[in-house]
Image (tube, rainbow, N blue to C red):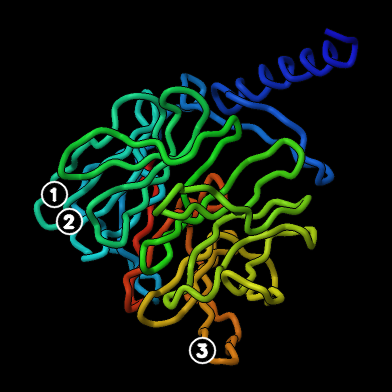
Amino acid sequence: MGLTDRVSARYDEEMRMKLKTLFGTILMIGLSSAPGILLAQRQAGPGVPPSDRRMVWVGRDGSVEALAAPPRAYGLPRLSPDGSMIAIEIRDAKYDVYTYEIKSGALTRITTEGINRSPLWTVDGKRLAFSSSKPGPTNLYWKPLAGGEMERLTESENPHGPQSFLPDGSVLSFYEIHTETGRDIWMLPMTGERKPSLFLKTAALEGGAVFSPDGHWIAYVSNDSGRFEIYLKPYPGPGERIQISKEGGAEPMWGKESWELFYRNVAKVMVVKITPGPPVGIGQPQLLFDKKFERSPGSRANFDVTPDGQRLLMVQLVEGK
């Protein structure tokens, strides 16, 4: 090991210990080529005590209606295609994926081995895709809800996380965290050899890639301007991107029937009306409400939207906690 390697290793270990004090166990540390960006992947541990949160329906006016599910350390909820269930991650001693049946209140654990996060329904509602550290680096897996084993979808030393399925289910967008380029957007075909292809890679951080209702556009977040903003880019391309947010934005999510793009700017929830075209029409960002709900730990939205765009499924800290 050379001097540079020893210094780098010592730096990583010292930084890992500092971050562990604040955030719990750190699995990976790296420097992005984007100025001032440190990349770290976090694992649940004693330094990350679970907080009591609840799942809530939020109206477009900000009105809140709590679901009957007991308070847990919920995150990244996703409505099933038929609207009857919610897939969600829960952090106890570690992260695992669960489903919650809205009518009966049944909460079912789907994963057990490794650290499992960011659940995403397939378009037919029969499987859940998610990220998992089984048996090593965090890559993409999926699992049938009717029973069966987890199946690995990607294999890389770099962490992966699922973002969105193309409306016909043929492609899965996902992010990859890379020590040189930060967070990049990739596409995984769900048929054939399932060989991933790069969609967007720059020195900035990109992510939160969600397909439009017709599959012809990708909404995503990038900080290449110096702050995070929401952009729209043709899929599969070519074509120039269009900026959607005006004063910062993160966590994009579509209203699948309403053709509205929702996003967050800190505590503000914004919405933009999109007209499919051609040419595509972009409305002005409108404020729905400014209210505190739990934000995403990354680029993926920590909320979902009903198809008609009338209610948002969000996560809220229990009062007094």
Q: Earlier in the sequence, mark 3 or mark 2?
A: 2
What residue is disc 3 on?
A: 275
**Which numbered disc covers residue 105?**
1
Name the quarter where the N terminus is drawn.
top right
State left or right for residue 28 relative to residue 121.
right
Q: Give the foreground label among 3 and 2.
A: 3
The span from disc 1 to disc 3 (Cα, nearest Å) is 37 Å
- Rendered position, 67 above or below 139: below
- Rendered position, 147 above or below 227: above
Measured as percent of width and height from the top left, residue 267 is found at: 54, 61
Comparing 7 with 135, the one in front is: 135
- Helix or strand or loop: what does disc 3 sit on? strand
Measured as percent of width and height from the top left, residue 291 is found at: 48, 63
Q: Give the foreground label among 1 and 3.
A: 3
In contact (CB < 8 Å): disc 1 and disc 3:
no
Comparing 73 with 235, the one in front is: 235
Residue count near mark 1 (Cα–Cα under 10 Å), binned few <14, some 14–19, many ≥20: some
**Quarter residue 42 falls in:** top right
Residue count near mark 2 (Cα–Cα under 10 Å), binned few <14, some 14–19, many ≥20: some
Measured as percent of width and height from the top left, residue 127 is found at: 27, 49
What residue is disc 2 on?
A: 102
The span from disc 2 to disc 1 (Cα, nearest Å) is 5 Å
Callout 3 amino acid: Thr
Name the quarter where the C terminus is drawn.
top left
Callout 2 amino acid: Ile
The span from disc 3 to disc 2 (Cα, nearest Å) is 32 Å
In contact (CB < 8 Å): disc 3 and disc 2:
no
Q: Which residue of the protein is positioned furthest toward the left in this rendering? A: 104
